[in-house]
Structure formats: structure tokens, C-alpha cells
Amino acid sequence: MLNYIYKRFLNFLLLVVLASTMGYFLAAIALNPRSNYEGRNPPLPASTVEKKLSDLNMNDKTPVVERYFTWVGGVVKGDLGTTLNEKSVNSEISRRIWVSLRLLLIGSIIGSVLGVVTGVVSAVRQYKPFDRYFSIASYIFLSAPVFLIALLLKFGAINLNDKLGHTLIYTVGEYSPEFQGAGISSLINRIQHLVLPTLSIALGGVAFYSRYQRNAMLDVLSSDHLRTARAKGLTKRQALFKHGLRVAILPLTTFFAYSFGLLITGAAFTETIFGWNGMGQWFITAVQANDINSTAAVILFSSVLVLLSGFLADVITAALDPRVRLR
Amino acid sequence: MTELARLSRGQLVRRRFLRNRLAVFGLCNLVFMFFIAFIGPFLNKYKWDELDFLNLLRPPSKEHWFGTTQIGGDVFALTMRGLQKSLIIGLLVALFSTGIAAMVGAFAGYLGGKIDKAMMWVVDLLLVLPAFLLIAVMSPLYRGKTWLIFVVLLAAFGWMITSRIVRGMAMSLRERDFIRAARYMGVPTRTIVFRHLIPNVASILIIAATLDVGGTILSETGLSYLGFGIQPPDVSLGSLIADGTNSALTYPWLFCFAGGALVLTVLSVSFIGDGLRDAFDPGASTGANS
């Protein structure tokens, strides 16, 4: 088992390097930081522009490969460079990373757990009203883009707050800046801000996981080993949880890994719509501002996150499935 | 009895598909969407890029079926224009990406060995980076140019999962007698792949292409929503939703028609895709085992 994990880890490390390299080259070729210094009134002297761009390691007159190695040299030492407005990328990340991770972790945990539960219940009660309603609902949520769900939730919350006469659910920011309390009341304030972004991320997840879990569970329900478990005297519930769920959850671990890519995409929308200063929102502003170093940093972050979840999924699969362990 | 025996596979699939109520609903609805998107603008008085300065921000009326925008654009004409764009992009990208997926998957699975390994590495690498991030980063490259570059990019980053499925099927087909016979008779690899392998995974490809249409429309509208996709003055459902967002609470018609058209289209496509899957292979699970 350790050997297996070790091999997977090496594979992932290599993929992170390749993916971030690809990301850096794409950003360096497609984005044009020089445009930020053009068209200013009064115009900046050419030498100043060159010097600024060179200091940032974003000068398009330096060959891309050379810039890449400068960037990698910094990354290896733990320095991700400087943003376009001359702040350290590292400090920007440390400020933003928890904002995004909180959103992604809570969203994905709620999404996958609720999705698996509704999927299992739908499979057990196939064609009963519960199954029908959830099937239709999950179809609709899978057909609506994240930004539409987020916007509708936001409008709904604004209407709700209007009706109530006070703000129950906040629609902007991650906490109220003027808020002075501490302890429980500060936690409640944060939860009031957290509800909508988390819901917009989690709803798609619930729909996605429940569809797959329902199908996987239906396969398992008609399998021989479950009948054997029932025959040896287990109750239906015991057989389902001990022998059914374990098998039915296996294929989902793979989906869990790749779903992080989708989640990061979703986070970019929800963070923008709800005004959270996270990694996704940073990515969008960085691309719009032609900021190569910040863009590369977010791509690095997302590839590490996707691969880490993939690695985790492999470990969970190995723990659940003895056949994988022996490989 | 004899009537049953005479049913061809095509007839059987069609019959199973038509028995599925959701799938038929999806098909009718999608046909309707196409009809209204391409015929609708001819029935309407206003063009999508025409401004009616006498009617700014009016709610839906007989004159302007879906109301007007802040600058007097006809929301019906704009929505239809956006729907056209989204539908065309969805279809084109699904066609291209399924084509790439079929070729990569079939060759990788059939040839095996080092070529297979190399191709699957590329697939793994592309799956690591969310396509959305890559296309957004590359958006300056096609800004101000034709939207067809956008289509190519969407296809270039959308074929990986289907190619994995095709590869798996090609690996098992490789050992079947008819492929072996062809190989031993000296049929060149290219002919085997195109004439024997790909036709045998056609049902999977049709299903994948259909579901891809929905997925593509979602990514296209998402990118356009943030300004990375279809560029103004042209419109897509995504950019329409983005424009309508700020005033959506007071002027809901700016927002809800585009949003509704988007959800209905994608919903229909996924009903059709699932219906096709059940029709082609009623016993199969929905990919949970792949």
C-alpha cells in the first residue's frame, strides 16, 4: 500500500510541474502587461516602462523561456513573484487562500455528502415520489450554470431581506467590516455571509453526485453479493450500509478528484458575484489586468488542489478496495 | 412475432427513444428552440442591433415582446441572437470535440503501448487544469477576432473524458475476432480504426456528443458572462445575463428571458442525451462503472 501511494505521489508531483509550466507559458504568451503602461497621459518614458516590466519579470522583450526560468527559480525558493501593482504574490495568496479554501471545502463536503445521501435514498426508493422529485430537481440544477444559480440565490435573498425588514442573509462580502462583536456573534455574522456562496457551490455538487450515486447504487442493489448478505441473515439496512454503500461509493472517489477543477471554476463565479476576495475572483481580475504572475499563481494553486484531491481519492480508493492495494 | 424479428437496430433504438417521455419532451423543446432562434427574428419587427430610442427600459408589450433594454435594444431580438450563437457554438464544439475524442481514444486503445501511455498523459495533464481557466487566460488571443477561434479552443479542451471512454472500448474491441481478422489480413491501422473501430463505438459517440452540446453551452455562457467569450457588440446568452444582472430586480425582463432560454436548452439537451443512452443500451448503467 505504501509503495502504491508513493508511486501515485510521484506521478502527481510530475503533473503539477507540467501543468503549472503549461499555465505559465499560456499566461506569458497570451497576456500583455505592457498594455497597462500604454495610453497614459502624460506618457511614461520608454525606459521606465522597460525597467518596470523587467523588474516584474513580465517584459515581453525577454524570451519567454528565460522569464519562465526566472519564475521557476523563485517558485522553488517559495517566492511566487510580484503582482502588477507591485505587491508580493505570496502575501496576496496568504490573504486569499483561506477565503477560497473555506468556500471550496465546505461547499464540496456539503455537496458530496448530501449528494451521496440523496442518491442512495433515491436508489432505494426508485420511482417513488422522493426519487422523482429529486431526479427532476437535479436535472434542473445540472442544466443551470453556477452563475445563474448564484444570481438567483442573491436576488432571492435580497427579496427575503426586504420582506423581513432586516438583513438575515448578507449578499456581499465575507463579513461585515463595521461589525464589532467577537466570539459567537462574529461567527454568526460570518455564517450569514457564508450561506449563499456555499449554497451556490454545493447545489450543483448535490445534483451531480446524487445522479451518479443513484446509478451506482442501483447497480449494487441488484448484485449477487448483496443478495448473499441478505441470505446470511443481515437486515436490509445492515446489508445496504455494510456491503452496498462501500462498493457503490468507489467510482465516486474518482469523480470527487476531478470535480475540484469544476469547483474552482464555480468559485471564480461565486466569489465574483458575492464580492469575496478569494483566489477565483483574483484570477478573473488578474487576467483582465494582464497580470502574468498572479494568473500563474492561481493556475499553480488550482493544479495543486486538483491533484491533491486526486491523490486523496486514490488513497481512499486503495483503503476501500483491497484489489487496488495489492497492485 | 414476425414483426418483432424484422425490426432493425435503428428502428429498435428509435422505438425505445420515443417511449421515453422526458427524452421526447427534450427533443420537441430543442426543435422549438432552434425554430424560434432562427425563424423568430424574421417575425419580429426589430433587428438585434437596432435601437428604439422612443422606448427605453419598457416592460414586455405587443410592440416589444420581451421588453427593451436601457438603450432601447429589443430584448426578444437580442435573446434570439444570443440563443443562435449558443446553439451554433454548442453544436460545432460537440462535433469537433467528439471527433478528436474518437480519434485519440481509438488510436490510443488500439495501438496500446507507448503511444497509448503518451496520449493518456496528455489527457491527464489537460484534465488537471480546468478548461475554464485555460480558455480565460487565452481570451486576449481572440479578442477582436472571429468567434470561431473561441469554438476551436472550447473543442480543444473538451474532449478528454470521452476519449478515455472510447479508449477503454477500443482496448476490448482490439481483441475481438473481426478486428483480429482484419489485422492478420494486413489491413492498415488507419483503415481498421476508421472503418471497424469507430463505427463500433458510434452509439457512445452520439451520446457523448449530445451531452457535450449542453456542457459546451454552459461553459460558453459562463465565459461570455465574465467577458472572456463572445465579445460585444455581438451577444451570447451569457453576456445578456451579465448585462441584465445589475438591474435584474427592478427590470426582470432584462435577465429572465435569457436565463430561461439557457436553462431550457441545456435541460432539453440532457434529456435527449440520457434518452439516447437508455435507447442504445437499456441494460447499461449510466457510466458509474467506467
Image (spheres, coloured by chain):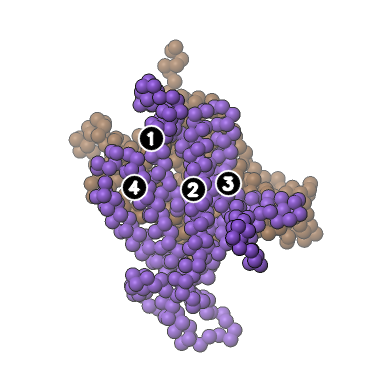
Chain colours: A purple, B brown
Q: Pointers 1 and 2 in contact (CB under 8 A)? A: no
**Residue A70, x across and y down, in percent:** 35, 75
Asked if residue B102 lies left or right of residue B256, the reply is: left
Q: Amino acid at mark 1?
A: Val
Determine the CA span between mark 1 and mark 3: 30 Å
Q: Compared with residue B171, is residue A222 higher up or lower down, i.e. above or below?
A: above
Q: Which residue is mark 4?
A: A315
Determine the CA span between mark 4 and mark 2: 17 Å
Q: Which residue is mark 1?
A: A247
Q: Quadrant of residue A40?
A: bottom right
Q: Amino acid at mark 4?
A: Val
Q: Amino acid at mark 3?
A: Ala
Q: Nearer the viewer, mark 4 or mark 3?
A: 4
Chain name for mark 2:
A
Q: Which residue is mark 3?
A: A144
* Nearer-N-terminus badge (1/2): 2
